[in-house]
Amino acid sequence: MKSSAQSGKPADEALSRVIDGLWARFLPEIRDRVAVLEAAASDVAARKLTDSARAEAESVAHKLAGILGTFNLTRGTVLARELEMTFSRESSPSAADGDRLVVIVAEIRTMVENRPSAS
């Protein structure tokens, strides 16, 4: 007779429930971070991004890259890293970058809002 640890199925389901619970707990913070990036991307497109907003966006993108990967949103991690790299440059992103940033953040927002749960 196999234990639940040997079969994997009950353990996988339990882990999925725990991850879903953590997602629900951290979702408001994740949404806040996405909102910061949305504002920064809009500011870039409008050519009014401040240095402090750029630094905040870089920090938020870094944190978001880590947490999205934790919740198996690998594409979100890749996109957040692109944002982080863009906001980390010494010079502010160009208006042309703004269009791309808006698209990236919109894709991250969609991933966050549509993340499937295990249940």
Image (cartoon, rainbow, N blue to C red):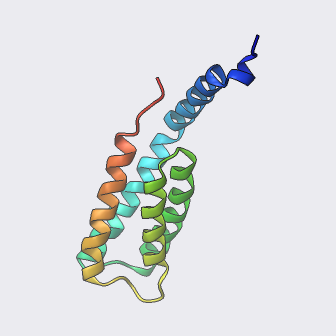
Horizontal placement of 89 versus 98: left or right?
A: right
**What residue is rendered at 35% in x and 42% in y?**
113
User: Picture coordinates of residue 45 (x, y %)?
Assistant: 25, 75
**What residue is rendered at 23% in x and 76% in y?**
46
User: Picture coordinates of residue 54 (x, y %)?
Assistant: 43, 75
Of residues 73 and 106, which is closer to you in this image?
73
Corner quadrant of residue 34: bottom left
Does 115 appear above or below 58?
above
Does 91 appear above or below 49?
below
Does 87 appear above or below 32?
below
In this rendering, does residue 50 appear at all? yes
Corner quadrant of residue 105: bottom left
Counting labels gives: 0
User: Picture coordinates of residue 64 (x, y %)?
Assistant: 50, 57
**What residue is rendered at 37% in x and 54% in y?**
108
In this rendering, does residue 47 appear at all? no
Does 28 appear above or below 40?
above
**What residue is rendered at 34% in x and 51% in y?**
109
Of residues 55 and 109, which is closer to you in this image?
109
